[in-house]
Image (cartoon, rainbow, N blue to C red):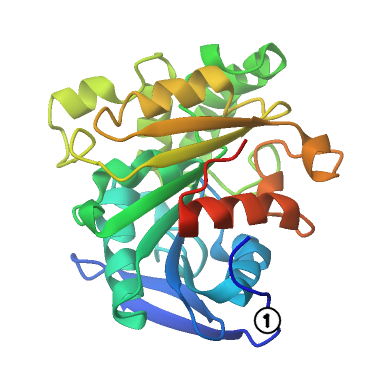
Amino acid sequence: MGARMSDAVSMQDIGFNAADSWPLAGTLYRGDVPQVAILISAGTGFPRRFYRHAARYFAARGAVVLTFDFRGTGESGAVDLAQSEIDYPDWGRLDMTAALETLEAAAPGLPLVQLGHSAGGMFAGFMENHAKVVRHAFVSVGTGFWGAHHLWRIPMELFFWWGFGPWELARYGYIRGGGLWSGEALPPKVFKTWRRWSQRRCYFKPDLEARRWPHYFDEVQAPICAWVFEDDGIATPKSARDTLRCYPAAQSSIAERSPKDFGVSRMGHEGAFRAGREALWAEIWDWLVQGATPR
């Protein structure tokens, strides 16, 4: 099962800059005698502090772990979010790229692996330095196409895209956090790009084919294991398979799981990173460190 657990975990808040000089906030977790460096890339609207329980667990197993806030969110926020030019792919092509460089500098000589939650896995193909990653774990990663989600979610999602969201943009210029959208506030371009992609099953493929942004989806070769949960209405097996098709050169597999497999009553789209998910994190650890495919 890998390295022993240790109580000696240090935590350090840091700042670093993306290539375009945008200041980003991160937290480094470091355990005794680390053997691997893990980049945890967040889902849309999730601040880095949400991943602190999993980060401490992995550090205690023997890792250097970096969590960070995407630009426009958390402590990497914008002064005037309504007027910001932040677009959705910027989180992958600029922020995740910079975060990996920062982690490499903090953990010289250690193998680099990535744990992506939702958009944090989806955007791995935007990373200019993706070839430095030796293995990816995708957790609750699936396209945002509403038609591939659980049926009970569809009315709420359509209202979010075409009712609530436009009203928020008209009234405030961005999507506020809280209420119907419980995550961090979203820049206007992030919302609009996400909405455009989510109206079609091919998701962002037309934009990739048009080279709207630099990307490397066809070049990613690091193996991917994707965890999906039966009560996750977004990252369904169908939407996860659609995601993995965007990484044609990478060997990939899907681990379909139920909350009861880990002794909990709920996973949903975000539950994999809540406290008390050590049984799941152990599976992820074995994959990231040893390449052990879950059974």
Q: Secondary structure at mark 1?
A: loop
Tell me which corner region of the image, top left, top right, bottom left or bottom right, holds residue 180. Answer: top right
Q: Residues within 10 Å of mark 1 (few under 14, many from 20)?
A: some
Q: Which residue is mark 1?
A: 6
Residues 258 and 251: in front is 251
From the image, which quarter does the N terminus lie in?
bottom right
Number of labels in the image equals: 1
User: Could one spot residue 71 in this view of the protein?
Assistant: no
Left or right, 110 with respect to 39, comes to left
Left or right, 31 with respect to 196, comes to right
Residues 283 and 71: in front is 283
Left or right, 252 with respect to 282, comes to left
Please report the residue visible at 71 percent of the width from the left and 46 percent of the height from the top: 271
Residues 60 and 235: in front is 60
Please report the residue visible at 19 percent of the width from the left and 53 percent of the height from the top: 128
Q: Is the residue 64 above or below the residue 159 in the image?
A: below
Residues 156 and 284: in front is 284
Please report the residue visible at 30 percent of the width from the left and 80 percent of the height from the top: 108
Q: Is the residue 234 above or below the residue 272 in the image?
A: above
Residue 21, x across and y down, in percent: 22, 71
User: Could one spot residue 134 in this view of the protein?
Assistant: yes
Q: Amino acid at mark 1?
A: Ser
Residue 132, x across and y down, in percent: 24, 59
From the image, which quarter does the C terminus lie in?
top right
Residue 197, x across and y down, in percent: 37, 24
Residue 225, x across and y down, in percent: 47, 39
Please report the residue visible at 41 percent of the width from the left and 40 percent of the height from the top: 224
